[in-house]
Image (cartoon, helix red, strand yellow):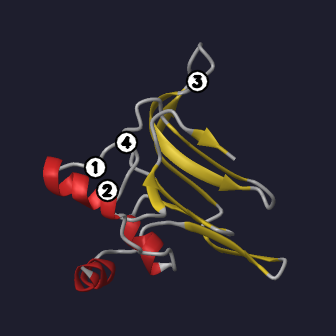
Amino acid sequence: MKQTLNYLMHRSVPAPFFFGSRSQGKLKIRGHIRRFFGHELPSKHGRAEGIFAGWVWDGEILRVRNDRYGLFPLFYYAKGSEIGVSPSISTLIAEGADAELNDGSVAVFLRLGQFLGNDTPFRHIHCLPPNASFA
């Protein structure tokens, strides 16, 4: 599995990412502080329409959101004092996300051929659910 991950990380073009961590009271930020993908259309109902996902880091708060159907893939990593966001799992791992496998998710995938909910094969990396917005 590790060889496959190394192959994927070196073969693909790195996707945009945001990665933040706090160590000894100091905040370290890497990557893109603002990224938006897809097309957001105005709506009369308050929630934007279209197919989109993105994030904005304003220096204090990371805001992440996507469309109501979750059609644009966006993944987030959260472990301890680290957080990462990217449309690519391999980019998150290349930037330092813990690649510990989630045995339960892998077992479900082997039986059903798909992951359930927001699961990925990794314990600390998840797919952003539809209509998500968090800060």
Three-letter code, disc 4: Gly
Q: Nearer the viewer, mark 2 or mark 1?
A: 2
Q: Which is nearer the N-term, disc 1 or disc 3? A: 3
Q: Which is nearer the N-term, disc 4 or disc 3? A: 3
Judging from the image, what secondary structure is the residue with disc 3 in? loop
- Where is the N terminus found, in terms of image quarters? bottom left
Res 115 label: 1
Q: Which residue is mark 4?
A: 117
Give the crowd class for mark 4: few <14, some 14-19, many >=20 residues within 10 Å.
few
Q: CA distance from mark 2 to mark 3?
A: 31 Å
Three-letter code, disc 3: Arg
Q: Left of 16 or right of it: where is 114?
A: left
Three-letter code, disc 1: Phe
Q: List x then y, in percent, for residue 79.
A: 59, 67
Q: Which is nearer the N-term, disc 2 or disc 3? A: 3
Q: CA distance from mark 1 to mark 4?
A: 7 Å
Give the crowd class for mark 2: few <14, some 14-19, many >=20 residues within 10 Å.
many
> Based on the displayed image, in which of its 4 quarters is residue 72 positioned?
top left
Give the crowd class for mark 3: few <14, some 14-19, many >=20 residues within 10 Å.
few
Q: Which residue is mark 3?
A: 47
Three-letter code, disc 2: Ser
Residue nearest the viewer, comparing 14 with 90: 90
Q: Which is nearer the N-term, disc 2 or disc 1? A: 2
Question: Which residue is drawn at the image coordinates 50% and 78% (left, top)?
Answer: 95
